[in-house]
Image (cartoon, rainbow, N blue to C red):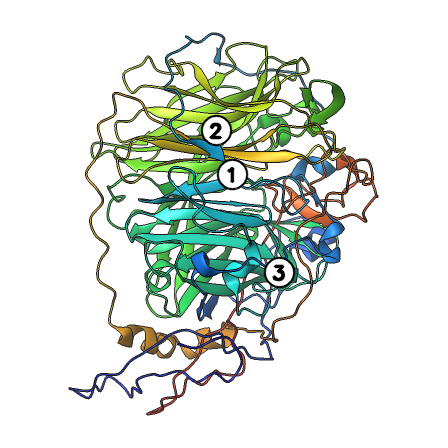
């Protein structure tokens, strides 16, 4: 079972046509990274909206962007045995800052406030935490943490900027704290310190008993290529070995704020990104990707298919989320994967006539080379909301300091959680809003339902039951019974309301449009964050335990000791006592014949093969990371600028350490107030030699 250098020998079965030699048992391994030193270049001209100025056309144009790529896996050592290597941010990332889509729009704060505000809630009804333990803290000296993680049958896996750790469910560590790039050991760009780019995602796929993990790599920023690093566990044990992949998201566009969803009925892991043309941080639209799930879960050569949404709808706002399936019941056969963004009328009155959720559907055809289509189902008008908190500047106060925190109120918060209840399908999601017109942050949440036809809003509300604290940076999910919970951050300018973590909820039998069970506290903060960038989030994550389909697991950040970047994270669980555990999901299907893995590249058309590009230099050493947070007072952090890895509709720009960047000073975004970011990938496959036991890479192939 091989390692990761060019020219590595692999044991394989030679195939010509569909001829098999009966009785031959051959040990096959589809691992190794066999990188090429060349990359093919493909030019794709992107459509530009009629009347768009040349400046937008130049930012939205894209070169060297294949629509389909194939990547080969490298097997990581078992994570339980991995010795953590240094993982600090390197110099290339110290200059990275992130901007919001709103930076260039100069949108006035209308102080309109939001409708359907829940002004009160009962106390003492929400269940108390069960598990409640410390997660990974700021070991890399960056912020924000991009806190997220997921739960499986035996473990909880958390990944923050720029490190991850796996815990037993009782909170005891099952691994060390491991720098993110070590998940991709053997990959030329993702598997070295300079590829530790953050914006992490971890998901447990309950239908295949596999774990999915991903982060960015942009080692030569502001120049490309920009990479999406993806790994899938070999078994249901995340502490074991993983199959890691390296895809080129784009040669020139940064693939910012990637969000993932498990969608088995399209045989895909779906990804949405905000794309920015580099150098210059020009908004380049929304990007949608589909990863070939059937191959990934079997450690095979796996395709990634890309859709540039700028050419479909250049006025998409960005921050789009893909649906992620919870529970034991799959979506209906061949159901498309929902993709949704939130649009505030005041953000773009011409294109957003009302406050709304905008629904799209992705369909993937893996036959032949593979294609993806994204169709517009249409907007859903919501109750009015005010998505502009403090003019998109830092907004949430903290005790004992004038430094405020960011809200990311310009996008939906992860996840877009999906369930199939049999008689109906449901989606829940949330975002932060100005609840009262006084820049008091609250959580606007939605439940969408679908029986036949299209999605509709079943219930919605703005949760801000009192004005003692701001509530923001939420994450929502539903359990097996249809009970709903939302976790979120809290803070105010008055002690003892330091940045902390709470959660609220409702039973399926409660009155609509209310989180009628009130709220509970996971952890009360005892300090404030004084770093002048004010970065917070950029997301948190609420998931549901697959063992009973009832227990919620939530992770978010908090502050214990006042300082510039003192964030810590917490992991906790809770369960509504009325929820009855569901049967476990069916066992995953048996893996397809290994012959399919070997024949995959040959089944692709010659035209598609020309679209694969690769790059493969030997792994380089050097520190990597996001943006380094200086010690107290030594770095100047600017309002609205991302200092950590990952920002939703924000893009990763870079500012010299000590330089102050303001939200209003980002590069121009283009003709319409809807400019955003893009991303693409390109990576190669390998072609089997006829009747050969050596796995020979083609020249223009990448890992």
Residue lying at 77% horizontally and 37% vertically, measured from the top left: 637
Q: Position of residue 431 (x, y in %)?
A: 52, 28
Question: Between residues 196 and 522, which one lies in front from this camera angle?
Answer: 522
Q: Which residue is mark 3?
A: 195
Taking 513 as reference, is 419 above or below it?
below
Q: Position of residue 152 (x, y in %)?
A: 34, 44
Q: Position of residue 512 (x, y in %)?
A: 35, 15
Q: Which residue is mark 2?
A: 430
Q: Measure how far apart labels 3 and 1 are at the Cα level.
A: 23 Å
Q: Is residue 523 left or right of residue 129?
A: right
Q: Which residue is mark 1?
A: 135
Q: Secondary structure at mark 1?
A: loop
Give the label, 3 or 1, closer to the camera: 1
Q: Circle 1: is it few (<14), some (14-19), or many (20+) Cα within 10 Å?
A: many
Q: Secondary structure at mark 3?
A: helix
Q: Circle 2: is it few (<14), some (14-19), or many (20+) Cα within 10 Å?
A: many
Q: Quadrant of the N terminus?
A: bottom left
Q: Measure how far apart labels 2 and 1 are at the Cα level.
A: 24 Å
Give the label, 2 or 1, closer to the camera: 1
Q: Position of residue 392 (x, y in %)?
A: 68, 29
What mark, if any, has residue 668 been given in the picture?
Answer: none
**First reached walking from the N terminus: tag 3 or tag 1:** 1
């Amino acid at each position: 079972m091989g390692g990761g250098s060019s020219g590595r020998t692999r044991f394989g079965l030679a195939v010509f046509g569909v001829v098999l030699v009966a009785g031959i048992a051959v040990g096959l391994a589809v691992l190794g990274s066999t990188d090429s030193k060349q990359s093919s270049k493909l030019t794709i001209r992107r459509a530009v909206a009629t009347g768009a100025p040349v400046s937008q056309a130049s930012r939205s144009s894209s070169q060297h962007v294949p629509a389909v790529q194939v990547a080969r896996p490298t097997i990581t050592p078992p994570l339980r045995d991995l010795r953590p290597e240094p993982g600090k941010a390197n110099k290339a990332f110290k200059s990275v800052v992130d901007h919001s889509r709103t930076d260039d729009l100069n949108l006035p704060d209308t102080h309109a406030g939001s409708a359907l505000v829940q002004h009160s809630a009962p106390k003492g009804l929400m269940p108390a935490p069960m598990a409640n333990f410390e997660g990974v803290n700021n070991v890399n000296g960056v912020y924000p943490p991009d806190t997220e993680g997921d739960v499986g049958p035996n473990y909880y896996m958390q990944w923050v900027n720029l490190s991850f750790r796996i815990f037993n469910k009782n909170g005891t560590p099952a691994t060390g704290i491991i720098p993110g790039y070590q998940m991709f050991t053997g990959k030329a760009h993702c598997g070295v310190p300079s590829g530790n780019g953050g914006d992490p995602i971890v998901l447990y796929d309950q239908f295949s008993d596999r774990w999915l993990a991903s982060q960015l790599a942009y080692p030569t920023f502001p120049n490309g290529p920009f990479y999406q690093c993806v790994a899938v566990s070999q078994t249901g044990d995340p502490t074991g070995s993983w199959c890691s992949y390296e895809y080129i998201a784009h040669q020139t566009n940064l693939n910012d704020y990637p969000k993932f969803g498990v969608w088995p009925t399209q045989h895909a892991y779906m990804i949405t990104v905000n794309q920015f043309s580099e150098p210059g941080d020009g908004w380049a639209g929304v990007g949608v990707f589909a990863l070939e799930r059937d191959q990934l879960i079997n450690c095979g050569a796996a395709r990634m298919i890309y859709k540039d949404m700028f050419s479909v709808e250049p006025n998409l706002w960005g921050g789009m989320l893909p649906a992620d399936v919870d529970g034991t019941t799959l979506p209906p056969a061949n159901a498309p994967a929902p993709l949704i963004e939130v649009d505030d009328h005041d953000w773009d009155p011409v294109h957003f006539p009302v406050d709304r959720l905008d629904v799209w559907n992705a369909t993937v055809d893996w036959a032949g080379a593979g294609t993806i289509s994204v169709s517009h189902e249409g907007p859903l008008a919501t109750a009015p909301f005010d998505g502009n908190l403090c003019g998109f500047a830092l907004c949430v106060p903290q005790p004992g300091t004038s430094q405020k925190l960011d809200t990311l109120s310009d996008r939906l918060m992860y996840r877009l959680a999906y369930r199939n209840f049999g008689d109906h399908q449901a989606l829940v999601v949330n975002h932060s809003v100005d609840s009262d017109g006084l820049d008091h942050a609250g959580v606007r949440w939605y439940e969408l339902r679908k029986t036949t036809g299209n999605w509709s809003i079943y219930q919605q509300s703005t949760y801000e039951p009192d004005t003692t604290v701001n509530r923001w940076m939420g994450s929502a999910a539903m359990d097996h019974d249809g009970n709903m919970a939302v976790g979120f951050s809290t803070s105010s300018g008055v002690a003892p309301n330091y940045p902390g973590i709470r959660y609220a909820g409702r039973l399926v039998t409660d009155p609509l449009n209310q989180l009628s069970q009130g709220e509970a506290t996971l952890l009360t903060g005892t300090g404030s964050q004084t770093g002048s960038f004010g970065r917070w989030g950029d997301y948190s994550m609420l998931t549901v335990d697959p063992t009973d389909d009832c227990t919620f697991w939530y992770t978010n950040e908090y502050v214990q000791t006042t300082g510039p970047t003192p964030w810590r994270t917490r992991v906790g669980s809770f369960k509504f006592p009325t929820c009855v555990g569901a049967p476990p999901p069916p066992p995953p299907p048996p893996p397809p014949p290994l012959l399919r893995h070997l024949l995959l590249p040959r089944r692709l058309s010659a035209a598609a093969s020309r679209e694969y590009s690769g790059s493969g230099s030997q792994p380089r050493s050097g520190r990597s990371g996001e943006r380094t947070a200086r010690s107290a007072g030594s770095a100047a952090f600017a309002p609205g600028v991302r200092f950590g890895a990952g920002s939703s509709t924000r893009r990763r720009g870079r500012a010299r350490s000590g330089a102050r960047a303001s939200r209003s000073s980002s590069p121009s975004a283009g003709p319409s107030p809807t400019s955003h970011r893009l991303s693409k990938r390109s990576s190669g496959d390998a072609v089997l030699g006829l009747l050969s036991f050596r796995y020979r890479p083609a020249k223009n192939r990448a890992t």
